[in-house]
Image (spheres, rainbow, N blue to C red):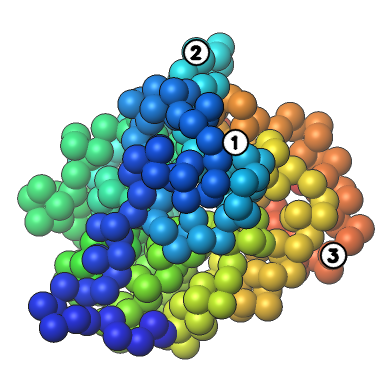
Amino acid sequence: MIPGSLVLSQVPVWQSVLARAITDPAELLAAVGLGDEWLPAARAAARLFPLRVPRGFVARMRSRDPHDPLLRQVLPLAEECLAVEGFGADPVGDLSAMAVPGVLHKYRGRVLLTATGACAVHCRYCFRRHFPYAEANPVADQWCQALNYIAGNDSITEVILSGGDPLSLSDRRLADLARRLEAIPHLRRLRLHTRLPIVLPERVTDELLGWLSATRLKTAVVVHVNHANEIDASVITALAGLKSTGAELLNQSVLLRGINDSVEVLTTLSEKLFEAGVFPYYLHQLDKVQGAAHFEVGESVARCLMAALNRQLPGYLVPRLVREIPGAPGKVWLT
Ligand code: SF4
């Protein structure tokens, strides 16, 4: 766990670190030693989807390298402003799957709660970059509609806290939500989908570990890492803290052109994840969201990469290549 999770003012350290995230493209370019020639496009693209990246994540980027795989995930580019056929605002049919505000019920036995619209980092390829979080806010009525929906449907055994990033919420709110979920007898599992332990490892506080350890629900924390360079010593410490709660740690990545579309990069990622106590779970084909077409890797290339990965790694280190298809009863496995 990260020491010093509270300062005297009782504002958790992680919230202060988050508040200092870089949101100005000029500051990001200066921080990584790149010139102003990138600035006009970055400003234009950031008007469509704002820039946000914690300084600790920026510190893991290579200086003066516009192709750095971490920088490419967060730097707004001119390509985001292009309209590309087949790429839309709601690529995975989230809106039609919303049972009540904030509850997406797509698959049998589990529901996803868009617990908050806030994220610590804005990933340029995010499939929810156009999601209307204001209309899908379960917090607005103190979770009542969402919890009533879950309590009234005993086929639901698992709740997935997603977002945005659920760990953007305070531990007080999350612990309260976990307690109310625990009170629903048919619930057995609680899953968190989060990128915060990776981009802002200070978020893994004693308070978070406390309520995660205490819940009667079996827990899984699914983090989101796309490249091994994202995992430094502070991330390894944060993941070890999460592991100590008894939670299963899994990773999901998105296959991204120019970032992780090579056998070498994916192999190193799986190995480094495992050393940090995390199993590779899913490798997602890009969801066709407007503004992210330049990240797409074709399906035949993806299948070739997976075949090569299978030759390089033991099976438990090979993630499943999947695509989400609106209306399908689960993720579609491509391998
Ligand atoms: S952390 Fe997840 S939800 Fe947030 S911008 Fe990145 S991909 Fe989207």
The response on whether ligand 1 sits within 8 Å of label 2 is no
Q: Quadrant of residue 158?
A: bottom left
| Residue extending furthest toward the left | 141
With 197 as the anchor, is 281 left or right in this view? right
- Amino acid type at image mark 1: Leu
Between the C-alphas of marks 3 and 2, the distance is 38 Å
Crowding near the residue tagged with mark 1, few <14, some 14–19, many ≥20 C-alpha atoms within 10 Å: many
- Amino acid type at image mark 3: Leu
Q: Quadrant of residue 159?
A: bottom left
Kindly identify which residue carries mark 3.
Answer: 313
Q: Earlier in the sequence, mark 1 or mark 3?
A: 1
Question: Which circle, 1 or 2, is nearer the viewer?
Answer: 2
Q: Quadrant of the N terminus?
A: bottom left
- The tag on residue 83 is 2
Do the residues under discs 1 and 2 have CB atoms within 8 angstroms? Answer: no
Q: Earlier in the sequence, mark 1 or mark 2?
A: 2
Q: Position of residue 80 (x, y in %)?
A: 49, 24
Can you see residue 74? Answer: yes
Q: Position of residue 202 (x, y in %)?
A: 37, 73
Secondary structure under tag 2 reads loop
Crowding near the residue tagged with mark 2, few <14, some 14–19, many ≥20 C-alpha atoms within 10 Å: few
Between the C-alphas of marks 1 and 2, the distance is 16 Å
Question: Which circle, 3 or 2, is nearer the viewer?
Answer: 2
Q: Earlier in the sequence, mark 3 or mark 2?
A: 2
